[in-house]
Image: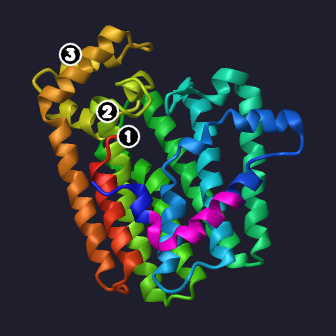
C-alpha cells in the first residue's frame, strides 16, 4: 500500500509550507486558548484534504502561497468539524486520545471550535479572492446540512441507503471535492480540469467515508473502539446491508431500539454484520467509487502529481486506520 510520505513527495516543499501556516493558525498568544488548542491532538491526522488541494494545484504549476494558505484553511475547517462532531456525538476518544469535550467540557470545546473557524475566515480573507470565500461558505453549508440530516435520521431511526449516501456526500465527499477544485483554481486550470478534479474528489470522498464506516466494524488501528458508530446510533452502510438482507435483522433492530447499547449489544451486532456480508458489500462500493475516481484523472496532465493522486486513492481504499 502506498504511504503518505511518498504520496506527498511531488509537493513536499509546499506541504512543509502548509504545515508551518497550519501551526501558526492553530495556536494563540493567549495562554489558556493555546492550552485548549494543544489538546486537540490535531497533529495525528492524515492531512488528506490539504494533500488533495496541493496535489491538484501541483498538476498545473508549483502550488502558490494562496494554495498553501487555503490548504491550511481546509485542514483547520476539518478539525473544527471534528470538534463539533465530538460534542454532538458525545464522543470521548478520537485517534486514541481523549477528545477536547471529554477533557474540558462542551462549553470550552464549542468555543475552541468557534475560534478555529475564525482562523479559517482569516486565511480565506487574506487571499483577497471573494470566489474562494464563497466556495468555502458553500462547503460549510453542505457540511451543516449533512450533519443536520444525520442527526434527524439518527433520532428517528429511519435511515436508508439514500439517506446514508446523502449524508456522507455532504459531510465528507463534497469537502474533498472542494479541496481538489480549489487547488486547480489556484493554479489557473481551465474549467474542464477543475470539474474533473472536483468529480475525482467527490468519488474518492465517498470511498473514504465508506472505508471509515467499514473500519468501525473491523479496524484495529483507528484509535477508537469497534462499534463506536453503533453506540452513537449511526446507521452506516454495513449495518444497512444487514438490516435489508439478514434473517436476523429483526433481532438486531430490537437491540438497536435501546437508547444505550451495552457492550454485549454492540458485540452481537458487530458479529451479525460480519456474518451478513455487509463488509464485503461495502468494500465493493468502495472499489466502485475508487474506479470512478481514477477515470476522472485520465484527462488531466500525466505527471508526478497525477500519479500521487492515483496512489492516494489506493491508500484510501486499502488503509487500516
The residue to which callout 3 is attached is: 251
Name the residue: 26% across, 32% down: 239
Rate crowding at label 2 as few (under 14), some (14 to 19) or many (20 or more) other CA atoms within 10 Å. some
Quadrant (top left/top right/bottom left/bottom right) for the N terminus = bottom left
Horizontal side of 296 relative to 154 (left or right) equals left
Q: Is residue 237 magenta?
A: no
Tell me the residue that label 1 is attached to. 321
Secondary structure, mark 3, is helix
Please give left or right for residue 113 compared with residue 281 in the image: right
Q: CA distance from mark 2 to mark 3?
A: 24 Å
> How far apart, in angstroms, are the residues tagged by discs 1 and 2?
7 Å
Relative side of 23 to 208, left or right: right
The secondary structure type at the circle numbered 1 is loop
The image shows residue 185 at horizontal and vertical percentages of 56, 81
Q: Residue at x 44, y 72 (%)?
A: 198
Residue located farthest toward the left when viewing the structure as drawn: 247
Could you say which is closer to the camera, residue 267 or residue 144? 267
Foreground pick, 40 / 295:
40
* Contact flag, marks 1 and 2 (Cβ < 8 Å): yes
Residue 294: % across, % down:
28, 71
Q: Is residue 211 visible?
A: yes
- The magenta span reads 8-20
Q: Position of residue 26 (x, y in %)?
A: 73, 49
Question: Quick one: SS at disc 2?
Answer: loop
Give the quarter of the image for residue 215: top left
User: Circle 2 sits on which residue?
Assistant: 219
Q: Nearer the viewer, mark 3 or mark 1?
A: 1
Instruction: Please tell me the numbered disc located at residue 178.
Output: none
Amino acid at each position: 500500500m502506498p504511504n503518505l510520505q511518498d504520496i506527498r513527495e511531488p509537493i513536499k516543499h509546499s506541504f512543509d509550507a502548509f504545515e508551518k501556516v497550519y501551526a501558526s493558525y492553530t495556536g494563540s498568544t493567549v495562554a489558556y486558548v493555546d492550552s485548549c488548542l494543544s489538546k486537540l491532538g490535531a497533529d495525528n491526522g492524515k492531512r488528506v484534504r490539504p494533500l488533495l488541494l496541493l496535489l491538484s494545484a501541483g498538476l498545473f504549476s508549483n502550488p502558490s502561497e494562496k494554495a498553501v494558505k487555503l490548504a491550511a484553511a481546509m485542514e483547520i475547517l476539518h478539525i473544527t468539524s471534528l470538534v463539533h462532531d465530538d460534542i454532538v456525538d458525545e464522543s470521548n476518544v478520537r485517534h486514541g486520545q481523549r477528545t477536547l469535550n471529554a477533557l474540558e467540557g462542551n462549553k470550552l470545546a464549542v468555543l475552541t471550535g468557534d475560534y478555529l473557524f475564525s482562523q479559517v475566515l482569516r486565511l480565506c480573507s487574506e487571499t483577497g479572492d471573494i470566489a474562494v470565500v464563497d466556495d468555502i461558505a458553500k462547503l460549510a453549508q453542505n457540511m451543516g446540512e449533512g450533519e443536520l440530516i444525520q442527526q434527524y435520521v439518527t433520532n428517528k431511526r429511519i435511515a436508508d441507503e439514500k439517506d446514508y449516501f446523502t449524508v456522507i456526500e455532504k459531510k465528507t465527499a463534497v469537502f474533498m471535492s472542494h479541496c481538489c477544485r480549489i487547488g486547480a483554481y489556484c493554479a489557473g486550470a481551465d474549467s474542464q480540469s477543475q470539474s474533473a478534479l472536483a468529480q475525482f474528489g467527490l468519488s474518492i470522498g465517498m470511498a473514504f467515508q465508506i472505508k471509515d464506516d467499514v473500519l468501525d466494524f473491523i479496524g484495529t488501528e483507528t484509535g477508537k473502539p469497534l462499534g463506536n458508530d453503533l453506540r452513537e446510533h449511526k446507521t452506516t452502510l454495513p449495518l444497512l446491508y444487514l438490516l435489508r438482507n439478514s434473517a436476523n435483522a429483526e433481532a438486531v433492530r430490537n437491540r438497536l431500539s435501546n437508547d444505550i447499547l451495552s457492550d454485549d449489544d454492540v458485540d452481537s451486532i458487530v458479529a451479525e454484520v460480519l456474518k451478513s456480508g455487509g463488509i464485503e458489500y461495502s468494500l465493493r462500493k468502495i472499489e466502485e467509487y475508487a474506479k470512478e475516481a481514477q477515470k476522472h484523472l485520465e484527462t488531466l496532465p500525466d505527471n508526478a502529481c497525477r500519479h500521487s493522486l492515483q496512489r492516494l486513492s489506493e491508500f484510501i481504499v486499502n488503509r487500516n486506520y
